[in-house]
Amino acid sequence: GESVGLHLPTLSVQEGDNSIINCAYSNSASDYFIWYKQESGKGPQFIIDIRSNMDKRQGQRVTVLLNKTVKHLSLQIAATQPGDSAVYFCAENMRNTGRRALTFGSGTRLQVQP
Amino acid sequence: DTEVTQTPKHLVMGMTNKKSLKCEQHMGHRAMYWYKQKAKKPPELMFVYSYEKLSINESVPSRFSPECPNSSLLNLHLHALQPEDSALYLCASSQDRAALAKNIQYFGAGTRLSVL
């Protein structure tokens, strides 16, 4: 079936470098996407979202890029810090189905080396 | 404030026990959710309540019974669970307004459940 997935299960970066976490989705009906960060022992924490009518959205140190042509989503973290170490999930929602539910990708673990 | 509070944080129960997980939010959200998360896996949707009515049940076994007493509270009643039901159970809430294009869900810290 159609699903949201990630290319890399683990990403290791040096402190201060930029990180890019990727996500592929296959459902063309997806019109809203969210990135969550989940630290050990905690629930997922909202980072940033983007609607399908946009291709880029920026937050504080984070940028989400959406390429609908190839059904690809990425999360860029600038000047990665040790506190950014966590598992990152992309999630998609198909609002036009009336289904108020998110489907999560498989997740990428980000490890920040000091 | 985007806080969703779940209790208890940890729960150990036998297969013949009956227990309940509780979730509370005071953000005025009208949609509430239960997810199950196994280790190193993404959250999997179990139930969705919209305006205190069950709107989605993802074919969850009847040994899990959700309840939404009011717009701020969500319970998950557990009975006769199996060891494979051991997982992190997450509650979330969102505004749930059809006119909005967004559906940001805010999560609690979860209840770590162990079934012996």
Image: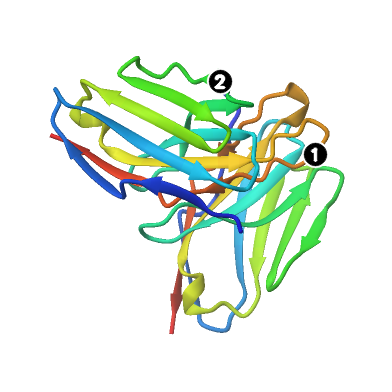
**Image quadrant containing the N terminus of chain B:** bottom right
Q: Residue at x 44, y 16 (%)?
A: B59
Count residues near mark 1 (Cα–Cα under 10 Å), then give few for <14, some for 14-19, many for 20+: some
Q: How many angstroms separate mark 1 from mark 2 (CA)? A: 19 Å
SS class, disc 2:
strand
Query: Which circle marks residue B59 in the picture?
Result: none
Q: Residue at x 73, y 67 (%)?
A: A59
- The location of residue B11, given as percent across then percent down, is 23, 43
- The location of residue B78, given as percent across then percent down, is 29, 26
- Nearer to us in this view, B102 or A74: B102
- Left or right of A104 on screen, residue A109: left
- Left or right of A113 on screen, residue B33: right
- Nearer to us in this view, B49 or A111: B49
Residue type of the residue flagged with mark 1: Ala
- Nearer to us in this view, B85 or A84: B85
Q: Which residue is mark 1?
A: B101
Q: Which residue is mark 2?
A: B56
One can see residue A71 in this view: no
- The location of residue A77, given as percent across then percent down, is 63, 70
Q: Quadrant of residue B25?
A: top right
Residue type of the residue flagged with mark 2: Ile
Label whose residue precedes the other's in the sequence (1 or 2) = 2
One can see residue A81 in this view: yes
Looking at the picture, the colour scheme in use is rainbow
**Image quadrant containing the C terminus of chain B:** top left
Q: Chain of mark 2?
A: B
Q: Residue at x 34, y 45 (%)?
A: B111
Count residues near mark 2 (Cα–Cα under 10 Å), then give few for <14, some for 14-19, many for 20+: some
- The location of residue B31, given as percent across then percent down, is 62, 33
